[in-house]
Image: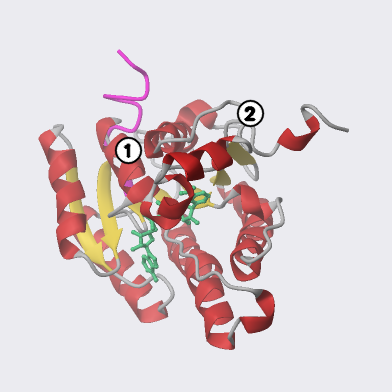
Amino acid sequence: MNFLEGEILQGQRALVTGGSSGIGAAVCRALGKAGARVVVNYLSSKEEGEQVVADIEAAGGQAMAIQADVSKEDDVKRMFAQMIEAWGSIDILVANAGMQWDGPFHEMSLKQWNKVLDVNLTGQFLCAREAVIEFNRRGIDSDLSCAAGKIICMSSVHDIIPWAGHVNYATSKGGVLMFMQSLAQEVAHNKIRVNAISPGAIKTPINRAAWETPEAEAELLKLIPYERVGNPEDIGRAAVWLASDASDYMTGTTSYIDGGMTLYPGFREGG
Ligand code: NAD
């Protein structure tokens, strides 16, 4: 049996924010296939959320969709309460919801800055705080996992690669890096593991313009030594492993899943 399917997360309860599209949807499906029950959080499209639930159920898994805006404290508290009411607790949080609102720095409005920070960074804080409270309340259930809980922060290669024209986004992801490490340090003694995934270029709605035409994709490939654009499933598989006891000694780390984008591709021929 493929170790990422079937049993590795059997009985565990996962919540994936922004789970109704792109990377989040692939993470939901992968966790479901690995035996976890999955809350598919969506912001506005109930249909998309329900479609991911249907996909998981068609593959033999269990899931439910819950609406919440991760940047709103009341929404986040309500979402966790709904999940815990229905399934008793939470074992895995994938804080994946994110957005871009790009623009030249000198034209960037305060609204544009705050919105991206609110969703990409404060949203991770609000969700991780609820998860930590519940992990601490419940402690370790050794029938399910040797950890009391696992948090996976969806970051980006732009937590270390500066990105002109996207200063708000890169700042939010740089914040996620230090948020993840500081939280991991604080809660490790409670047997809570906190790690991040930093995807490179993955084909999803967030970056459609970067891959949708052959010309755009050719430009993008210049930045990827492995010479292919990533798929959401590349990230889904990593999330399963990070959520499972197979990665039990790992906390406070970032996995760059990027086809080598962070390897300074310009130096392959230059330098
Ligand atoms: P996407 O646009 O398909 O997914 C983002 C999801 O977040 C959507 O489902 C959206 O509805 C949700 N969302 C946005 N604001 C929200 C809010 N306030 N509350 C709840 N949900 C909200 O794009 P994606 O590529 O799948 O992005 C997922 C994550 O991966 C993001 O954090 C993004 O920054 C990160 N990422 C993506 C790439 C890539 O190349 N696609 C690369 C690096 C990092």
Q: Secondary structure at mark 2?
A: loop
**Which quadrant of the figure has residue 107?**
bottom right
Residue type (three-letter) at the residue carrying disc 1: Leu
90 vs 124, left or right, is: left
Instruction: Tell me if residue 182 comes above or below residue 108 in the rendering.
Output: above
- Left of 189 or right of it: where is 230? left
Residue stretch in magenta: 1-14
Q: Quadrant of the C terminus?
A: top right
The residue positioned 42% from the left and 56% from the top of the image is 206
* Residue 98, x across and y down, in percent: 46, 62
Residue behind label 1 places its C-beta within 8 angstroms of ligand 1: no
* Residue 126 highlighted magenta (yes or no): no
- The image shows residue 164 at horizontal and vertical percentages of 68, 63
Secondary structure beneath dot 1 equals helix
**Residue 7 counted in the magenta span:** yes
- Residue at the image point whose x is 37% and y is 19% from the top: 3
* Residue corresponding to mark 1: 31
- Which residue is situated farthest in the bottom direction here? 110
Asked if one can make out residue 109 in the rendered structure from this viewpoint, the answer is yes
Q: Which residue is mark 2?
A: 225
- Please report the residue visible at 55 percent of the width from the left and 67 percent of the height from the top: 121
Which is more toward the observer, 145 or 206?
206
